[in-house]
Amino acid sequence: MSTSTTASVSTHILDTSVGRPAEGVAVRLSARAGRDADWRTLGGSATDADGRCKDLPAPPEGTTHVRLDFAVEAYFETPANQRHRPADQQDPATHQADAQQNAPASRDSGTGAFFPEVAITFAVVPGEHYHVPLLLNPFGYSVYRGS
């Protein structure tokens, strides 16, 4: 058993609609000390090419609850053929024009993000590591405690 006085948190996102990691999703980590305490934003990151956030801040001592907020709407507004192309092969001007042109139509046709944000709240205890994977698609999501 660990003797650490704080928990640690990591996450990754898999876009199950295409079977690949979701790159570039903004993730914010917040914590509170008790269910009646106010949430305190600790910091954030964005998922890397492997869909992982490896640099989330450690919750402070006394944390009992952690919340991960995933901003997924912008990810799904990006055309699918741009989402999984290496960054050096993407044309930012084309990407922005495609996203602006396709976003309203994709919502009307049912292919946009039904859940624009995903907030996952979980209880923590000192000394434990919590890896919380998000399995994501435009119309649903699932989470679990990983290892």
Image: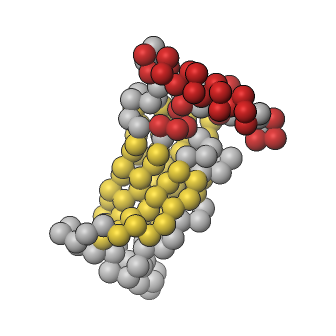
Residue drawn at x 44%, y 30% is 113
User: Where residue 94 sits in the image (x, y, percent)?
Assistant: 72, 28
Is residue 64 shown left or right of residue 9? Answer: left
User: Where residue 23 sits in the image (x, y, percent)?
Assistant: 62, 44
**Quadrant including the N terminus:** bottom left
Residue 143 visible in the displayed image: yes
**Most extreme residue toward the top, as rendered?**
109
Residue drawn at x 30%, y 71% is 32
Vertical position of residue 142 compared to residue 103: above or below: below
User: Where residue 116 sits in the image (x, y, percent)?
Assistant: 41, 37
**Most extreme residue toward the right, as rendered?**
88
Residue drawn at x 35%, y 70% is 40
Residue 129 visible in the displayed image: no
Residue drawn at x 38%, y 35% is 115
Question: In which quarter of the view is residue 97 placed?
Answer: top right
Tell me, what colour scheme is on the image?
secondary structure
Question: In which quarter of the view is residue 128 placed?
Answer: bottom left
Vertical position of residue 146 compared to residue 118: above or below: below
